[in-house]
Structures are given as C-alpha cells and as structure tokens.
Amino acid sequence: MGLSVVVTRDVEDRYRGFLASVMLEVSAGVYISPQLTKGSRERLWAVVTGWHQQLRRGSLTLVWQASDQPGGIGLLQLGEPLRDLLELDDFLLVRKR
C-alpha cells in the first residue's frame, strides 16, 4: 500500500464525484490517497475504464508505488496521449506512444 494519484483532464462530472468519494481532491482534477489498497485501486480503475469506454472523452492517469515496475512506479492511462515509463542507465524516462 502506498500513495496513489489520479489525474483527470476534460472528463464528465461523474468522474469527479466518484473519485472524490474515495480520494482527496487536492487540486482541480488531481486526486490522491495515501493508503489505497491494490484491490480498491483495481476496482476504482475498472469503474472509470467502463465509463471511459462508453463516453470516449477526456483522459485519466493513475500512478502508484509499484516495486515491480520501472522506477518503482505503476502507471495506467485512458485517453490520449498515452505514455510509457522506461528506465535507461538508472534514469526514469517518459515516452509518448
């Protein structure tokens, strides 16, 4: 369990209400939870993925502490532009797909 962050851009109000019910909105469209469990994170992502598949508008990014991922950061995204995290010579890089 570690810090999880969701960033939204140009999404419907339903996302804002749902995310604010489980996370703290620290800035417009930026939600954090210091101790979101893996199961809760997966359920949250399943809900917003379902909505995004129906509505096809905006983008969402979920970032969390993940020791098995490059740089120790887990990353899920919906919408454009998608990015990947890469480790190169001990540096963490972001690459647009």
Image (cartoon, rainbow, N blue to C red):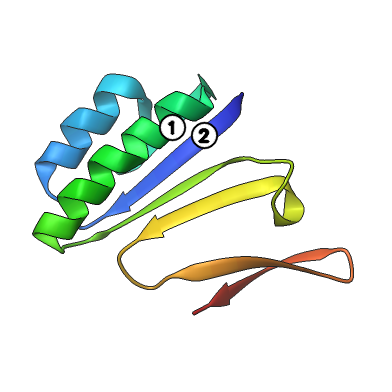
> Closer to the camera, 23 or 45?
45
Front: mark 1 or 2: 1
Helix, strand or loop status at disc 2: strand
Q: Dot 2, how many residues are within 10 Å of its Cα: few (below 14), some (14-19), or many (20+)?
A: many
Check if mark 1's residue and mark 2's residue have beta carbons within 8 Å: yes
Quick one: quadrant of the N terminus? top right
Place of residue 49 in the rendered image (x, y in percent of width and height, measured from the top left): 27, 49
Query: Could you tell me residue 22's position as x and y percent?
Result: 32, 22
**Would residue 27 be seen by someone viewing this image from the given angle?**
no
Which residue extends farthest bottom? Answer: 97
Query: Which three-letter amino acid code belongs to the residue tagged 1?
Result: Arg
Disc ID at residue 41:
1
Q: What residue type is labelled 2?
A: Ser
Report which residue position mark 2 lands on: 4
In three-dimensional space, the C-alpha distance between marks 1 and 2, rounded to whole angstroms, equals 8 Å
Of residues 8 and 82, the one nearer the viewer is 82
Q: Is residue 43 above or below residue 11?
A: above
- Count neighbours of disc 1 (C-alpha within 10 A) and say few if under 14, some if 14 to 19, many if 20 or more: some
Left or right position of 14 against 91? left
Q: Earlier in the sequence, mark 1 or mark 2?
A: 2
